[in-house]
Image: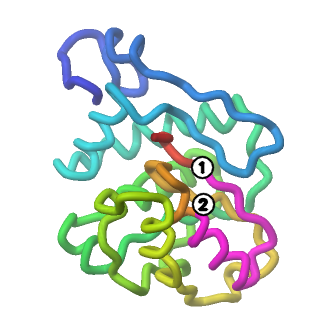
Amino acid sequence: MGCESAAFINRYGFCIECDKKMISLENFADTEIYSAFKYEGPVKEALHRFKYLKKKYYGKKIALFLEHFLTKQQIDAFDIIIPVPLHWKKEFRRGFNQCAVVAFCLSKRLGKRYVSGVLVKSRNTASQTTMKNREGRENNVKGSFSVKKRHLLKDKRILLLDDVYTSGATIREAKNTLLKNGAKKVNILVIAQA
């Protein structure tokens, strides 16, 4: 997935050389945000291919890794998995929501319930990558999420899944929207942290 080499590929889809370059992150027991990797090198390349070159099948490999990551970190105190949604226009242009693909595959691997369409990106915002600073990112996503079928969240412990954590503005806004609408607790899992 990182370099698309034909060399020996590990169970997660990376060649031996890419595997050596991947930086796993240390997560602490008292955190509510869990990051599997540093967003650079082979991980950055793989996520780019996944999102923009429509390599949807990468989702299964990423979910496999995240399953092992969650098991190793002993993170299992959640009832449902919810992906960070894309606005429908962005999802239509891309053809899929990469977070939804990973969340769905991960839910199957863990035997947890996958819930989509409850957290909705109701306002089409500019790409966070175009924002110059943290304040700009926060203002960009403020009020951009809403909830449908609120009853599905009531008293639920949620694992909210996103692909890349940069400033945290998007994920915090999504988390706060879930909590305001009845979720008991929201832990965040991101594939990579910038």
- CA–CA distance in space, label 2 to label 1: 6 Å
Nearest the eye: 47 or 138: 138
Question: In the picture provided, is 129 more to the left or to the right than 121?
Answer: left
Q: Residue at x 55, y 38 (%)?
A: 66
Query: Could you tell me residue 176's position as x and y percent?
Result: 66, 74
Q: Secondary structure at mark 2?
A: strand
Q: Which residue is mark 2?
A: 160
Q: Residue at x 36, y 56 (%)?
A: 98
Quarter of the image where one finds residue 67: top right
Q: Which residue is mark 1?
A: 189
Quarter of the image where one finds residue 126: bottom left
Query: Could you tell me residue 47's position as x and y percent?
Result: 32, 42
Which colouring convention does the figure follow? rainbow
Q: Secondary structure at mark 1?
A: strand
Report if residue 79 lies within the magenta region. Answer: no
Question: In the picture provided, is 83 more to the left or to the right than 186?
Answer: left
Q: Amino acid at mark 1?
A: Leu
Q: Amino acid at mark 2?
A: Leu
Query: Could you tell me residue 192's position as x and y percent?
Result: 48, 40
Q: Residue at x 76, y 35 (%)?
A: 28
Query: In the image, is residue 3 above or below residue 190?
Result: above
Disc 2 residue crowd, few under 14, some 14–19, many 20+, Cα 10 Å: many
Q: Are marks 2 and 1 in contact (CB under 8 Å)?
A: yes
Q: Residue at x 57, y 65 (%)?
A: 82
